[in-house]
Image: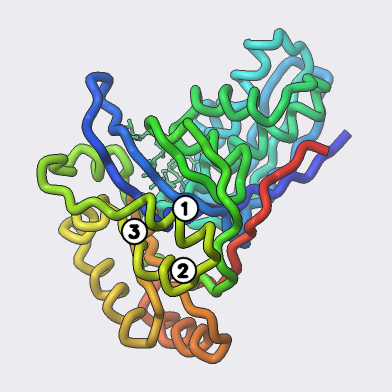
Amino acid sequence: MKLLVKAPAKINLALDVLHKRPDGYHEVEMIMTTIDLADRVELSLLQEDKIHILSHNRYVPDDQRNLAYQAALLLKNRFNVKKGVSISIEKTIPVAAGLAGGSSDAAAALRGLNKLWNLGLTLDELAQLGSEIGSDVSFCVYGGTALAKGRGEFITELPAPPTCWVILAKPFIGVSTAEVYRRLDVNRITHPNINEMINAIGQNDYQKVCQHVGNVLEEVTLNLHPEVAQIKDQMKRFGADAVLMSGSGPTVFGLVQHDSRMHRIYNGLRGFCDQVFAVRMLGERHTLD
Ligand SMILES: C[C@@](CO)(OP(=O)(O)O)[C@H](O)COP(=O)(O)OP(=O)(O)OC[C@H]1O[C@@H](n2ccc(N)nc2=O)[C@H](O)[C@@H]1O
Ligand SMILES: Nc1ncnc2c1ncn2[C@@H]1O[C@H](COP(=O)(O)OP(=O)(O)O)[C@@H](O)[C@H]1O
């Protein structure tokens, strides 16, 4: 038996850090949304008791460091599953880019294995298990648009944001999330207005969404990698309505509504960046069918 599960990337329309916690993590408030840029995770049932990872991307580990492997192992141990799985991951989402590719692969593995191994878990139960793998996995289990709190694992569903294009530009570098959080000075933060972003989405007000994008990790990554600031400047110059770094970076996204402007920005950036994509937000949550 085989199952193909889509694992979409996310962007953070807003990312605020409230404080550093005693456990070393940061208390966050984030507005996250899934986009139409996805890895394909294929799960094949094995009768033997083992987890096998296949990936042709040299930046993706094919052992227990892979987040999809960790998802399978967690389910096996927690529910005493004696069957195995071969997980083949076809990457489209750039790695270590602030787009939660690894977390989304893990979430796709949780959703798919729930079916393949007949576990009968709800989306809420899978999301709770996901938080043991990484802070972004719970959101990725649900997809759609959400407010994420805690270290990222407390999820409140939001409506789909106004329709627009999301242009993503990734420079030729990868970023370590842990390092970016480590370098953040929590006493020197200009906080984005998360409530206003929630209102903007609720009112389907595109201009207001553009006004309230903000990410407190941006300054840290911009200082480490000046090329991220250059990409931001270029996106603004080519006419994006809002420009922001996603997560810990280095991917920058721009929002536009008009097709012609999307093409101008896309073509203008292609020469300067490692990878450029123009995609839609997905809007809808995943369902368990
Ligand atoms: C910054 C964000 C924004 O969505 O995304 P990415 O840039 O990774 O996509 C997330 O908070 C990343 O989530 P995720 O990548 O799952 O993080 P984890 O594996 O749980 O943690 C990696 C490291 O980041 C730091 N970390 C993570 C989350 C958090 N709320 N506070 C932290 O301080 C910790 O040092 C941790 O050891
Ligand atoms: N399935 C996976 N896909 C991508 N990276 C993975 C995966 N599993 C583990 N990793 C590791 O996680 C790190 C962060 O990956 P990723 O999720 O792409 O970035 P980000 O945390 O910036 O969103 C990578 O450097 C990689 O070594």
Which residue is under mark 1?
Answer: 99
Tell me if label 2 and label 1 are in contact, CB under 8 Å: yes
Task: Please tell me whether mark 1 sits on a helix, a strand or a loop.
Answer: loop
| Position in image of residue 79 (x %, y %) | 70, 11
Q: Name the outermost residue toward the top.
A: 80
Sequence order check: which comes first, mark 2 or mark 1? 1
- Colour setting: rainbow
Residue type, numbered disc 2: Leu
Give the residue drawn at x 36%, y 79%.
Answer: 235
Q: Quadrant of residue 2?
A: top right
| Position in image of residue 51 (x %, y %) | 67, 24
Q: Nearer the viewer, residue 178 or 273?
A: 178
Quadrant in which the N terminus is drawn:
top right
Residue type, numbered disc 1: Leu
| CA–CA distance in space, label 1 to label 3 | 9 Å
Q: Nearer the viewer, residue 261 or 70?
A: 261
Q: Residues within 10 Å of mark 2 (few under 14, many from 20)?
A: many
Give the residue drawn at x 31%, y 44%.
Answer: 176
Residue 256 visible in the shown view: yes
Residue 274 visible in the shown view: no
| CA–CA distance in space, label 2 to label 1 | 10 Å
Tag of residue 250: 3
Tag of residue 272: none
Which residue is under mark 2?
Answer: 168
Give the residue drawn at x 53%, y 87%.
Answer: 263
Q: Is residue 87 left or right of residue 223?
A: right
| Position in image of residue 281 (x %, y %) | 59, 63
| Position in image of residue 208 (x %, y %) | 41, 69
Q: Is mark 1 within 8 Å of ligand 2?
A: yes
Sequence order check: which comes first, mark 2 or mark 3? 2
Residue type, numbered disc 3: Pro
Q: Residues within 10 Å of mark 1 (few under 14, many from 20)?
A: many
